[in-house]
C-alpha cells in the first residue's frame, strides 16, 4: 500500500523514492515542466514546475514526495509565474516559431500554448548566436537553447561522450560544444546518440529533415503538452514496486 | 504638352515646383508613395512611384539551413505565400539535386493553382470591383466591398466563396490556409487523400461556373466603357513570362519568353536557371525597389511588364478549354486593343482564374495525387534557382548554399519588382490624362490608385482592402511650405 499526498485537493499516491513530479505524472496529473525528463535525474533548473508546499515554493521535480504533503500547483498565482518564465525564455533566445522546423514538436511552444501565453511581454534580447553546421549529419541552432541541459546530461550519462556543456555565468550562460575548435564536427556525436532525441526545442537537428512531417501530424498538433507528458511518464502501474490499486485499470 | 510631360520621371527644374505626395500608397509588402511635381498652372512635371520600405529577407535568410528557406521566405507575404513557398522549394530541389516525383509535382501544382484562384478572386472582387463597378471617382462611402455586397450581393458572395475555395485547396496541400509547409526540398510532405480529393471535388464545378461568369463581367466592363478601358493608363511595354515547352500557359514551370513592344521575340524557352544572363536589375536613388531590365535592351528601354496581361497575351494557347475560348475572345476584342490596356489586366486575370479552376478540376481527377512517392534526392548542388509565375507575375528565387548546408547568398526578384517601371509608366500616363492642369480631388487621387491596383501589387491586397488605402496629399509652395493637406485615413475618412 502506497502513501499519498494532496495535489490541488486530490489525493496522489506515491512509491518510496518518487518525487512530487514523478508521482503526479504517474497519477495522471500534469505539472508544467521543461528541464524535467522521465529518463534523467531531476535537474531543477527551469523552475517551471514550481509548486507551493505548505506555503513555500519548491521545484516539484526535485521535491521528494512525502505522505501528508499539501501541494498546490494549478493555481493562478503559480501559472502566472510560469507564464512569466516562459515569456522570459522566449525573449532570451531567438525563437521564431513561424519558420522554425521544431514548431509543432517544440515543448517550449507547446508549454506556452498550455499556459495561454497570448502575446510577447518583454523586449527581445536578440542575442547573436551563429549556427554550427559543421557536422555532416547534425545542425546546431543555438538560438533556441533554453539551457535545460538535457543534451548535456544525455551525452554524458547515456552516450558517454560529453559533447555538450554550459559555459559562462548568469545572463551570458550558453551551450557550447566540448571540442577545441568548438565545432560539432570535431566531436564523435552521431545521429544515434541519445543527445539527438532529448532537445525539447529546436537546437539539435538532423540535417535535411526540416518540415518533412506535415502539419497535423506533429507531436503537439493533436494532443497538448499536458496530455503528451502523461503519455511519456511511467504510469503508476508501471512504476517500480507496482501499485495494486491501479492494477488492471487502463 | 511640354517636354517634361513627355517623360515625367525627372523634372528639368524641380526647384520651383509644388510637390504633392501620396504617402503611403499601400502597395506590396510595406509602404510606397507617389510624388507629383506640379507648376503654378497645375501642370504635371514629374511623377514617381517610390518604394520606401526596405525588406530584409535576402539578408536574414543568410546563415539559415537551406531546408528552412521555403517556410521562412513565404513570410514575405500573407496574400501569396504559396508563390514564395514553391519558388524556394523549386530552388531547393536543385540544391538537393532532385527531380521531383509526379505526385510531388502535381500536389505542388494543385497548391499553386489554388493560390492563383484565391489571389485573383481576392483582387478582382474585394479590391478592384468597387472601382470598376461603381466608377473611379464614385461616392467614396460606397466604393468598397461592403458597397459591392449591398449593390451586387450575388457577385460579392461569389467572390468570397471563390477565394474560400482556393484557400481550402491550399489547406489540403500545405496543411494551413496561410503559411503552410507542404513543399519541401525534393518534393512534398504529404499527398492528397481520397477524402481530401472528394471534399474539393464537391464544389469545383460551381467554382468553374462562377469563374466563367467573372470573365464575363470583365469583358462587359470593356464593352460598356470601351474608350475608358482601352486608354486608361495605357502604354506600350515589352513582356516577360514563363511558357511551357509547347508554348502553352503554365504558371508552375517552363522557360522564359520575352517579347518587345512590337511582339518580336527577344528570347524564348530560355532556361531560367541562368536568368541573370538575360535579366539585370538597375537601381535608382529615389526608390528602394530595383528596376529589372532585359540585358539586351539596356536599363533605359529594357523594362518590361509581367503578370496576367503578359502571360495571357504572350502564351500560344491556354491548355484548358474554357479559358482558351475566353483567351481567343480577349485577343480578338476590338482588334486586339485590350491586350495592351492597363485595365486589360483585370480581364486577363479573370481568364487565368478560370484556367486555375479548370486545372484544379483536372488535377483532382489524377490518381497521382494519392501517390506515396513524395520525395527525391540526388547529388547536392551549390546553387539553386526557382522560378514560377506567381499571381502577380514572374517570381525568381536564387540561393547559394555552402558546404555546411547554410545559405550564404539569396536574390529574390518578386513579381511587383519586375513591374516597377511599368507601374511608374502607368501612373505617369494617368497623370497626363487626368491630373495635368486640374485641381486635385480625392477622385483624381483614386485614378492613380486604380492604375496601380490594375497590376495587383502585392501588399496593396492586404492594406487597401475595402478600398480604403490610406493617403496623404500635401500641397507645398515653392519654398517647401505646406499650403494645404488632404488626408484619407485607413478608415476612409477625409480630413
Image (spheres, coloured by chain):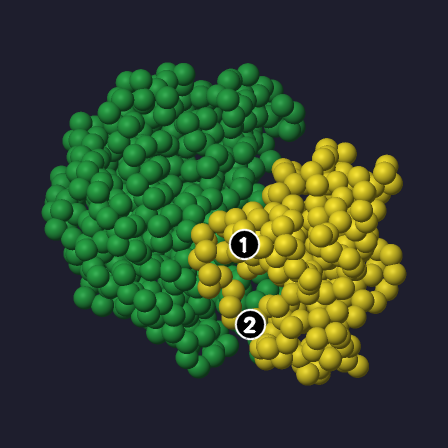
Chain colours: A yellow, B green
Specify few, some or many for label 1: CA neighbours under 10 Å numbering under 14, 14-19, or 20 or more.
few
| Closer mark to the observer between disc 2 and disc 1 | 1
Position in image of residue B473 (x %, y %): 54, 26
Is residue B16 visible to the viewer in this orientation of the structure?
yes
Q: Quadrant of residue B254?
A: bottom left
Q: Looking at the picture, tell me which residue is in the foreground, B4 or A75.
A: A75
Q: Secondary structure at mark 2?
A: loop
Q: Secondary structure at mark 1?
A: loop
Q: How many marks?
A: 2
Residue at image position (51%, 18%) is: B493
- What is the CA distance from the residue labelled 2 to the residue labelled 1? 43 Å
Chain bearing mark 1: A
Q: Quadrant of residue B21?
A: top right
Name the N-terminal-most of marks 2 and 1.
2
Position in image of residue B18 (x %, y %): 56, 29
Chain bearing mark 2: A
Q: Looking at the picture, tell me which residue is in the foreground, A181 or B45.
A: A181
Is residue B463 toward the left or the right of residue A168 in the image?
left
On screen, A185 above or below B494? below
Residue at image position (28%, 65%) is: B371
Position in image of residue B171 (x %, y %): 38, 48
Is residue B162 toward the left or the right of residue A23 in the image?
left
Is residue B328 toward the left or the right of residue B170 in the image?
left
Position in image of residue B377 (x %, y %): 41, 76
Residue at image position (22%, 40%) is: B203
Q: Which mark is residue A248?
A: 1
Report the residue marked by disc 2: A207
Amino acid at each position: 500500500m502506497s502513501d499519498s499526498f494532496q495535489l490541488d485537493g486530490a489525493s496522489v499516491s506515491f512509491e518510496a523514492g518518487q518525487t512530487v513530479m514523478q508521482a503526479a505524472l504517474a497519477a495522471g496529473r500534469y505539472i508544467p515542466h521543461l528541464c524535467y525528463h522521465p529518463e534523467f535525474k531531476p535537474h531543477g533548473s527551469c523552475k517551471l514546475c514550481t509548486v507551493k508546499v505548505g506555503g513555500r515554493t519548491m521545484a516539484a521535480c526535485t521535491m521528494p514526495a512525502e505522505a501528508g504533503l499539501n501541494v498546490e500547483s494549478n493555481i493562478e498565482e503559480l501559472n502566472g509565474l510560469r507564464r512569466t518564465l516562459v515569456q522570459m525564455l522566449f525573449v532570451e533566445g531567438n525563437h521564431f516559431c513561424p519558420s522554425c522546423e521544431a514548431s509543432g514538436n517544440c515543448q517550449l511552444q507547446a508549454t506556452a500554448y498550455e499556459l495561454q501565453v497570448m502575446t510577447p511581454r518583454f523586449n527581445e534580447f536578440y542575442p547573436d548566436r551563429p549556427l554550427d553546421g559543421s557536422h555532416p549529419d547534425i545542425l546546431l541552432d543555438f538560438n533556441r537553447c533554453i539551457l535545460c541541459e538535457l543534451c548535456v546530461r544525455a551525452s554524458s550519462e547515456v552516450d558517454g561522450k560529453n559533447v555538450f556543456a554550459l559555459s559562462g555565468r548568469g545572463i551570458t550562460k550558453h551551450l557550447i560544444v566540448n571540442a577545441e575548435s568548438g565545432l560539432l564536427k570535431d566531436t564523435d556525436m552521431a545521429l544515434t546518440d541519445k543527445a539527438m532525441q532529448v532537445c525539447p526545442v529546436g537546437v539539435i537537428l538532423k540535417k535535411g529533415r526540416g518540415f518533412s512531417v506535415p502539419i497535423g501530424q506533429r507531436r503537439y498538433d493533436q494532443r497538448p503538452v499536458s496530455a503528451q507528458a502523461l503519455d511519456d511518464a511511467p504510469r503508476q502501474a508501471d512504476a517500480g514496486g507496482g501499485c495494486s490499486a491501479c492494477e488492471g485499470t487502463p | 504638352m511640354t517636354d517634361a510631360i513627355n517623360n515625367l520621371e525627372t523634372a528639368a527644374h524641380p526647384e520651383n515646383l509644388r510637390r504633392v505626395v501620396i504617402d503611403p500608397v499601400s502597395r506590396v509588402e510595406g509602404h510606397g508613395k507617389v510624388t507629383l511635381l506640379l507648376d503654378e498652372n497645375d501642370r504635371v512635371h514629374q511623377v514617381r512611384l517610390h518604394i520606401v520600405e526596405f525588406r530584409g529577407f535576402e539578408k536574414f535568410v543568410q546563415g539559415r539551413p537551406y531546408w528552412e528557406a521555403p517556410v521562412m521566405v513565404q513570410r514575405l507575404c500573407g496574400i501569396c505565400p504559396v508563390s514564395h513557398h514553391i519558388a524556394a522549394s523549386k530552388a531547393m530541389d536543385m540544391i538537393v539535386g532532385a527531380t521531383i516525383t509526379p505526385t510531388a509535382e502535381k500536389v505542388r501544382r494543385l497548391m499553386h493553382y489554388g493560390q492563383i484562384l484565391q489571389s485573383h478572386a481576392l483582387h478582382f472582387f474585394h479590391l478592384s470591383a468597387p472601382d470598376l463597378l461603381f466608377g473611379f471617382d464614385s461616392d467614396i462611402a460606397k466604393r468598397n466591398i461592403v458597397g459591392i455586397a449591398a449593390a451586387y450581393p450575388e457577385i460579392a458572395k461569389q467572390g468570397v466563396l471563390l477565394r474560400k475555395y482556393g484557400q481550402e485547396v491550399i489547406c489540403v496541400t500545405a496543411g494551413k490556409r496561410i503559411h503552410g509547409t507542404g513543399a519541401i526540398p525534393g518534393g512534398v510532405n504529404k499527398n492528397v487523400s481520397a477524402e481530401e480529393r472528394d471534399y474539393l471535388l464537391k464544389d469545383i464545378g460551381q467554382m468553374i461556373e462562377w469563374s466563367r461568369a467573372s470573365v464575363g463581367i470583365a469583358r462587359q466592363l470593356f464593352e460598356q466603357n470601351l474608350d475608358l478601358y482601352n486608354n486608361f493608363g495605357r502604354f506600350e511595354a515589352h513582356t516577360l513570362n514563363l511558357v511551357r515547352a509547347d508554348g502553352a500557359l503554365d504558371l508552375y514551370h517552363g522557360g522564359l519568353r520575352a517579347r518587345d513592344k512590337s511582339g518580336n521575340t527577344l528570347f524564348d524557352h530560355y532556361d531560367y536557371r541562368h536568368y541573370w544572363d538575360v535579366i539585370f536589375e538597375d537601381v535608382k536613388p529615389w526608390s528602394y525597389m530595383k528596376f529589372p531590365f532585359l540585358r539586351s535592351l539596356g536599363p533605359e528601354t529594357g523594362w518590361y511588364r509581367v503578370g496576367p496581361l503578359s502571360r495571357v497575351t504572350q502564351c500560344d494557347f491556354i491548355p484548358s478549354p474554357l479559358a482558351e475560348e475566353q483567351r481567343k475572345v480577349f485577343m480578338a476584342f476590338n482588334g486586339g486593343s485590350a491586350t495592351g490596356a492597363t485595365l486589360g489586366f483585370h480581364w486577363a486575370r479573370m481568364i487565368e482564374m478560370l484556367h486555375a479552376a479548370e486545372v484544379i478540376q483536372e488535377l483532382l481527377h489524377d490518381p497521382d495525387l494519392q501517390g506515396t512517392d513524395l520525395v527525391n534526392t540526388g547529388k547536392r548542388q551549390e546553387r539553386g534557382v526557382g522560378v514560377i509565375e506567381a499571381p502577380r507575375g514572374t517570381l525568381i528565387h536564387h540561393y547559394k548554399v555552402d558546404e555546411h548546408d547554410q545559405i550564404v547568398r539569396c536574390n529574390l526578384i518578386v513579381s511587383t519588382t519586375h513591374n516597377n517601371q511599368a507601374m511608374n509608366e502607368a501612373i505617369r500616363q494617368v497623370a497626363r490624362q487626368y491630373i495635368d492642369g486640374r485641381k486635385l480631388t480625392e477622385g483624381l487621387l483614386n485614378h492613380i490608385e486604380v492604375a496601380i491596383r490594375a497590376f495587383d501589387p502585392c501588399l496593396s491586397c492586404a492594406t487597401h482592402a475595402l478600398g480604403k488605402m490610406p493617403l496623404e496629399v500635401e500641397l507645398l509652395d515653392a519654398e517647401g511650405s505646406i499650403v494645404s493637406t488632404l488626408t484619407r485615413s485607413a478608415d476612409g475618412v477625409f480630413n
